[in-house]
Image (cartoon, rainbow, N blue to C red):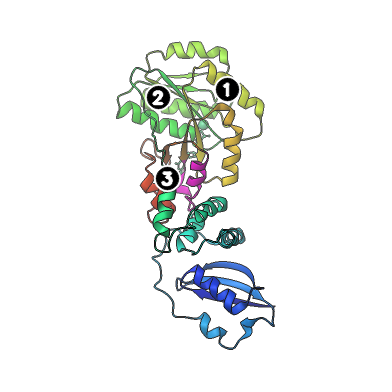
Amino acid sequence: MRILTIRGRSMKEALDRVRREAGEDAVILSTGTSLGGECEVSVAVERSSPARMPNRRRRTIDPPAKAPPPRQNAPERTVDDVHRRLGVLESFIRFKVPHESPVFTRLLDAGVEESLVRGIAESCAAVTDRETETHVRRRIARLLAEVDPLKAIEGANDVVAFVGPTGAGKTTTIAKLAARFALSQRRRVGLISEDTERIAAVHQLRTYARILDLPLRTIARPQDAASALEALADRDIILVDTSGLGGQNRDRVGALHRILDALGTREVILTVAATASASDLRASAKRLEGLHPSRIVVTKIDETVRPGILLTCADLGLPFSHITHGQVVPDDIAPARTERLVSRILGEAALV
Ligand SMILES: Nc1nc2c(ncn2[C@@H]2O[C@H](COP(=O)(O)OP(=O)(O)O)[C@@H](O)[C@H]2O)c(=O)[nH]1
Ligand SMILES: [Mg+2]
């Protein structure tokens, strides 16, 4: 058994060479990009394979193609990354995608889930080499298209609740939005905290309420809803902070559902951190689907080098409301803009 590294200007060229030079029985171990910017495939071959032909070495070290511009914050590759790359590569072969473009490597580097990259790759089957990047860009933009920031509607007495795992950034996001609605939109904002079990949690929201000069009520049971709503009857929008529902506790989801019902909640916003893994994020969304969230806020985009998680969020089928990018209230929040998100995912724009 020998390990060979075979390169090409595109993944297709490298794979053609693998087939030609290492034979059909070569086992692909990993794929990636060489320091010179070429596509690189490492394969294991039997000693008797054609790869032992004397001219193999010369052919594997063609002059490097023009190096692509360095990507910002390119994460280090792990064994998992190599597995994902191989999975995607398999799908190129299986779905007969006629070419491989570095854009797919960029998607994987950005942490886009393998299944999503495969879907995007499949959709490229009938697209020419030159059009691939444009096609991928359009496809991602379509996935992220439903951008619809939450607004405070004058006189609507809207109740909007934020749910999500502990530490996702619910309270901080509420403070940011409350400040923006109150200060720049001049809306009357009220706050309700359902997160009454942890003293620190109410204290945190109470501090923001005091700084922003906004009324705050706490609520622990559905029976408390009427008096809280009465106290906030003159508000345009009421933002409800909830306790984190990270664990498997279905009773807690049911109890929260009853409270949100009693409050006549118009919208439930799923709040998730961009630092979560795709599987954790999908599990949280599944656990909370009984609360019928209608939008998603993605927090902590500043803390990840893998903004590809945004495509997982989009895949949950919820329109984005806002993206948050830091701890500073109220500055570090912005409506999700499709073009900007696409650029982030493709590694062309700064993460923040
Ligand atoms: N870096 C960063 N930190 C954030 C962001 N949003 C919230 N945090 C921090 O995450 C931690 C948990 O936030 P918190 O609002 O208490 O989460 P909750 O448990 O969902 O209410 C706090 O230290 C916040 O300052 C963000 O967009 N970026
Ligand atoms: Mg909180």
Position of residue 212 in the picture relative to residue 301 (left or right) = left
Q: Position of residue 234 (x, y in %)?
A: 37, 14
Other-residue count near label 3 (Cα within 10 Å), few / some / many at <14 / 14–19 / ≥20 = few
Examine the image and state in which quarter residue 247 appears.
Answer: top right
Position of residue 337 in the picture relative to residue 318 (left or right) = left
Residue named by callout 3: 142
Amino acid on which the number 3 mark rests in the picture: Arg
Q: Would you place residue 316 above or below residue 193 in this image?
A: below
**Looking at this view, is 139 or 226 the one in front?**
139
Q: Would you place residue 203 above or below residue 226 in this image?
A: below
Queried whether the magenta region covers residue 6, the answer comes back as no
Comes first in the chain, label 3 or label 1: 3
Comes first in the chain, label 1 or label 2: 2
Residue named by callout 1: 257
Other-residue count near label 2 (Cα within 10 Å), few / some / many at <14 / 14–19 / ≥20 = few
Q: CA distance from mark 2 to mark 3?
A: 41 Å
Mark 2 vs ligand 2: CB below 8 Å: no
Q: Which residues are magenta?
A: 299-316
The residue located at (56%, 53%) in the rendering is 114
Mark 3: which secondary structure?
Answer: helix
Residue named by callout 2: 210
